[in-house]
Amino acid sequence: MKKSPAQLSDIFTCTRCGYCCQGETTVSLDQEDQARMMAELGLSREEMEEQYWRVTEGVVQMRIVDHHCIFYTAESGCAVHEGRPWRCGQWPLHPSILADEDNFRTIRESCPGINQELSWEQFCGVFRLLLEQDKRLLC
Ligand code: SF4
Ligand code: SF4
């Protein structure tokens, strides 16, 4: 019998709580992230730097407003969803989960979207299958 593919929803369903968009800093944007976000918003690099980015010694991050990423809104979540940095799309399925159960616990505590019923072993079993299906898994 053919094995059914692993489903992301087996281990994670985003509750849109917005917790991962809060804080005093954001993920950094690599060159591909920068190009994707500029294309999504139809803005030049200069315009992005004027309005949305914070550039520190060549490292590009998103600006913080009221203790959250400038693109986060309580009403509708991420305002640049299709153009978000790949690390935002990866969260909370960080590969470090596979290496250490403590990493799993720490991430699970900060993300209510993780299926809280699963043990680390169960979670990793599905997570590995998902990565086999798609190496650059986005949530
Ligand atoms: S870009 Fe979107 S997903 Fe990433 S931190 Fe900002 S609001 Fe959150
Ligand atoms: S990824 Fe997790 S922390 Fe971020 S909005 Fe979804 S459920 Fe909340």
Image (cartoon, helix red, strand yellow):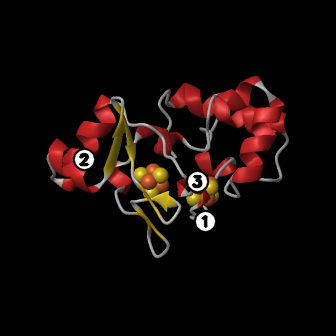
Q: Secondary structure at mark 3?
A: helix
User: How far across and how far down the image is residue 31, in percent?
Assistant: 29, 30
* Front residue of this view, candidates 44 and 80: 44
User: Is residue 43 visible to us here?
Assistant: yes
**Residue hosting label 3:** 20
CB of residue at label 3: within 8 Å of ligand 2?
A: yes
Q: Earlier in the sequence, mark 2 or mark 3?
A: 3
Give the foreground label among 2 and 3: 2
Q: Secondary structure at mark 2?
A: helix
Tag 3 near tag 1, CB within 8 Å: no
Tag 1 near tag 2, CB within 8 Å: no
**Residue hosting label 1:** 17
Name, please, the residue furthest toward the bottom. 75
Name the residue at 30% across, 32% down. 32
**Residue type highlighted by circle 2:** Glu
CB of residue at label 1: within 8 Å of ligand 2?
A: yes
Name the residue at 57% across, 29% down. 131
**Residue hosting label 2:** 49
Label 1, residues with CA under 10 Å away: few <14, some 14-19, many ≥20: few
Give the foreground label among 1 and 2: 2
Give me the C-alpha separation between circle 3 and circle 1.
8 Å
Above or below, 96 against 44 in this view is above
User: How far across and how far down the image is residue 132, in percent?
Assistant: 56, 25
